[in-house]
Image: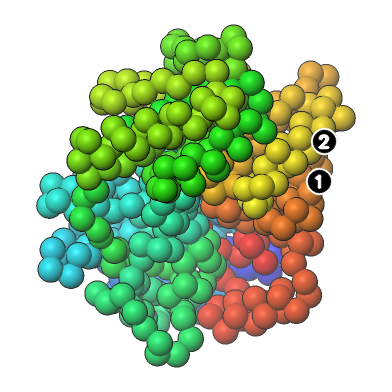
Amino acid sequence: MDNKYNHVDPKTIEKLFKICGKGNVIYEKELLENYACDESNKLLCHAPEIVVKPKNAEQVSKIMELANESLIPVTPRGAGSGIAGAAIPIFGGILLSLERMNKIIEIDRVNRVAIVEPGVITNDLCKKVSEEGLFYAGYPMSVGASSIGGNVATNAGGGKVIKYGNTRKHILGLEVVLPTGEILEIGGKFRKSTWGYDLLNLLIGSEGTLGIFTKIVVNLIPLPGMTVDLLAPFRNIEEAVSAFTNSIISSKSVPVSVEFMDKVSVDATTSYLNTNLPLQNEAEAYLLITVEGDTKEKLEDLYEKVGTTLLQMGALDVFIADNKTNSEKIWLVRREILEGLKFKDPNVCAGGDVVVPVSEIPVIVDAIRRISRSCNVTPAIVGHIGDGNLHPALFKPDGITVEEWLRLSEEILSKIVDVAVKLGGVGSGEHGVGIEKRSLFLRSKSQVEIKLMRGIKQLFDPNWILNPGKVL
Ligand SMILES: Cc1cc2nc3c(=O)[nH]c(=O)nc-3n(C[C@H](O)[C@H](O)[C@H](O)COP(=O)(O)OP(=O)(O)OC[C@H]3O[C@@H](n4cnc5c(N)ncnc54)[C@H](O)[C@@H]3O)c2cc1C
């Protein structure tokens, strides 16, 4: 990738001080390192030349005008929890952190929407709206760390997509600053529109390459009923898949979550957390299923039906977590898997995230294991199995350097993505393309599609200054 961009010079620094206030600009080398990485592979880290922390859309707009005139790259950053390297400023330049834009501006009960700034932490929004009897259904596993702006930019998925859909389903409107500095309002407090091209959905999932979100209108629903979690260990993945697909039909209900953890990831995470899950010695695969019901009776009826089907289809047992403590113990293992894998191997490559039709899950799992083992690499597999979305993680074998490992893990992931595409899926369901999967992405799309996408990018960002080197 060519670096055609200019550096941040002293004059630009002075102008940025004027726009944001000197206290909201970071240019000290040692502090810039704090913005060099996200949660992707540490070998990809690259520090920006300067960090700016604007407080409102007007400041963001002035920064973009300045960067556009001066041909300086700008990388937007939410909470930096991304796993695809999309918030890493690979060309240096300006890192635009949305961390100070973190207000919940309004919770509107009549229209069932909230208007928030992008830097609000997802879980803070969930908690705040629940005090009003309302529910924001976005739930990435990073819910306590990620920002809502980052969720919109990556079209984040997570643990409730099977029932409630991914972030795209929960966004009604955006205020966006374009790379040229223009401020655009799209959508609003309404739920339908046949009023021209759908720019809202184009911007959602654009990984900070088309515009910077400065205000977000999110859809809220009434707080749903009670939930119960079922933990079901299985001898193999095939039984687990046919058990949960059958349980959906037999119980006539789509669960809130169907999560999958294999033995390798459970063993790594329970030893990291110093805990255990039932039947850990026998189980090769665990399903974590959350069901929801309006009343206690309906909920009991539902989890009994689901549990019975799971047992009939081969579950070694079904453990019911019907109180907060038990539930949290299981969900903690699921949420902390990334940390557990890093605990086992700090060089673990955990950015993979493929989607296939649910019926093809056993095939892709088999392919992940076969491809990895043929390179002497042990894989761990977890994921939102209800959506056909799996996260393969790869442990670095002994005897190779980290640079060699970067190349080898990319080669393995590339083969896995090829299989996923052949099975009718795609190379990422939620983590995005970023820099990690850019070459895989470009290879997996037709020339016509890439031409259209480049044309769109050119229109939004004539100088390609916004988050360059990502996606396209
Ligand atoms: C332990 C763990 C679990 C995770 N689980 C999930 C999961 O279940 N589902 C899932 O989808 N992801 C998951 N992730 C990945 C990550 O949390 C999501 O991608 C999240 O949406 C990123 O949000 P962020 O605020 O950290 O964004 P960042 O990492 O800061 O940025 C991500 C992208 O968004 C862009 N961006 C950020 N803010 C804005 C803005 N205001 N305007 C325009 N562009 C912006 C950035 O430029 C970048 O391209 C997980 C990560 C971790 C570490």
Q: What residue type is labelled 1?
A: Lys
Q: Is residue 186 visible?
A: yes
Q: Which amino acid does label 2 sit on?
A: Ile
Q: Which of 302 and 283 is in front in this view?
A: 302
Q: Where is residue 408 in the image (x, y as percent from the top left)?
A: 81, 37
- Mark 1 lies on residue: 415
Q: Is mark 1 on a helix, strand or loop?
A: helix
Give the residue displayed 33% in from the left and 59% down from the top. Answer: 118
Give the residue displayed 53% in from the left and 80% down from the top. Answer: 460
Q: Quadrant of residue 458?
A: bottom right
Asked if the residue at label 1 sits under 8 Å from ligand 1, the reply is no
User: Count the marks: how many?
Assistant: 2
Q: Is residue 441 left or right of residue 117?
A: right
Q: How far apart are marks 2 and 1 (CA)?
A: 7 Å
Q: In this view, does 195 lie to the left or right of 377?
A: left
Q: Which of 443 and 195 is in front in this view?
A: 195
Q: Are marks 2 and 1 in contact (CB under 8 Å)?
A: yes
**Extreme residue in the bottom direction:** 196
Q: How is the image coloured?
A: rainbow
At label 2, counting other C-alpha atoms closer than 10 Å, the crowd grade (few under 14, some 14-19, many 20 or more) is some
Instruction: Note whether 207 is above or below 307 in the view shown.
Output: below
Give the residue displayed 54% in from the left and 27% down from the top. Answer: 312
Give the mark nearest the N terminus, 2 or 1: 2
Q: In this view, does 433 lie to the left or right of 193?
A: right
- Mark 2 lies on residue: 371
Q: Position of residue 323 (x, y in %)?
A: 26, 24
Q: Which of 136 and 56 is in front in this view?
A: 136
